[in-house]
């Protein structure tokens, strides 16, 4: 028999930064709202489009507000999840909320948020399906089935476009697989060619996603609320959905 302890990392807008704090997720909202129930683990700067536009940053393109905002979020999550695979590889002896010490596995269960947050987590364009390759114009059509998306395929597609499909003259970025590092823009990476390349993969931004390669986690399949909401109901855990919420489950 398995027992689950839900832990959530919630990020809220405070003082022009995003405050990242960790708390038990399987407790009532009144308790979670108390200052003593949260442990701050970091602060993420908030990107303001209107400020960036006034400073001369374009709205679209490789240096545009759209890409920069998402990249900033993933740089911060890369620091939060640094060494995740090695840290969660083996069983941990952890003290649970009831005071008992248990042998525990730690894994990410889901990324929960509204549509804009889901777009940012997947580096996608707005209002796209994260689970399958359904085009935006067909989102209301329930009579057709489309192939499922997965993080590994999305990663390879982004890398292929960034590398110019193997052509040195068409190379858009000099890549580094660390999510907290900015890919070096190449001469061929103009605003026109960048946006044209994005269209080939459903308007996904070309950058390193912080959640790629994380153990037992697929950012495309585990970013939707509905998929995991029913799981949480079945194991009878109370969950308060918050903006930019990263959910981890510790399993005994």
Image (cartoon, grey):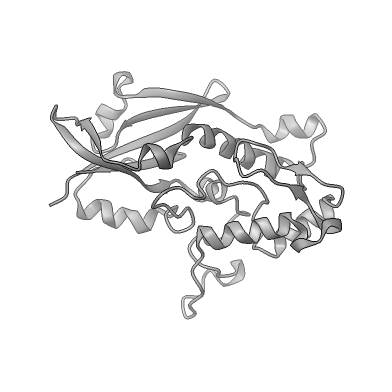
> Residue at the spot x=69%, y=38% of the render?
182
Is residue 241 at least partly visible in the picture? no
Q: Quadrant of the C terminus?
A: top left
The total of numbered circles placed on residues is 0
Q: Where is residue 58, by image quadrant?
A: top right
In the image: residue 195, left or right of residue 41: right
**Which residue occupies the foreground of this view, 183 or 37?**
183
**Which residue occupies the foreground of this view, 243 or 74?**
74
**Residue 179 appears at what percent x and percent y?**
59, 40
Name the residue furthest bottom. Answer: 143
**Residue 56 appears at what percent x and percent y?**
83, 33
Is residue 71 at least partly visible in the picture? yes
Q: Where is residue 163, by image quadrant?
A: bottom right
**Residue 247 appears at what percent x and percent y?**
36, 42
In the image: residue 144, left or right of residue 69: left
Q: With respect to residue 102, does 60 lie above or below?
A: below
In the image: residue 15, left or right of residue 91: right
> Residue at the spot x=47%, y=80% of the render?
143
In the image: residue 198, left or right of residue 167: left
Q: With respect to residue 179, does 141 lie above or below?
A: below
Q: With respect to residue 80, does 236 lie above or below?
A: below
**Residue 89 appears at what percent x and percent y?**
35, 43
């Amino acid at each position: 028999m398995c027992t689950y302890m839900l832990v959530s990392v919630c990020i809220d807008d405070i003082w022009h930064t995003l405050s990242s704090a960790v708390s038990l997720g399987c407790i009532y909202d009144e308790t979670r709202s108390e200052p003593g129930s949260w442990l701050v683990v970091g602060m993420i700067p908030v990107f303001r489009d209107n400020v960036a536009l006034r400073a001369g940053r374009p709205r679209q393109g490789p240096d545009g507000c759209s890409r920069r905002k998402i990249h900033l979020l993933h740089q911060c999550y890369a620091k939060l999840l640094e060494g995740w695979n090695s840290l969660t590889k083996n069983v941990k002896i952890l003290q649970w909320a009831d005071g008992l010490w248990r042998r525990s596995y730690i894994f990410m269960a889901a990324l929960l948020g509204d549509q804009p947050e889901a777009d940012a987590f997947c580096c996608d364009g707005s209002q796209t399906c994260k689970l399958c390759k359904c085009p935006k114009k067909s989102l209301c059509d329930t009579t057709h089935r489309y192939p499922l998306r997965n993080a590994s395929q999305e990663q390879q597609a982004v890398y292929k476009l960034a590398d110019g499909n193997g052509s040195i003259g068409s190379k858009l970025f000099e890549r580094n697989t660390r999510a907290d590092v900015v890919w070096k823009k190449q001469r061929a990476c103009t605003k026109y060619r960048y946006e044209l390349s994005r269209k080939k993969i459903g308007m996904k931004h070309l950058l390193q996603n912080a959640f790629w390669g994380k153990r037992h986690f697929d950012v495309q399949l585990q970013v939707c609320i509905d998929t995991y909401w029913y799981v949480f109901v079945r194991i009878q855990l109370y969950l308060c959905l918050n903006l930019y919420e990263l959910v981890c489950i510790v399993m005994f």
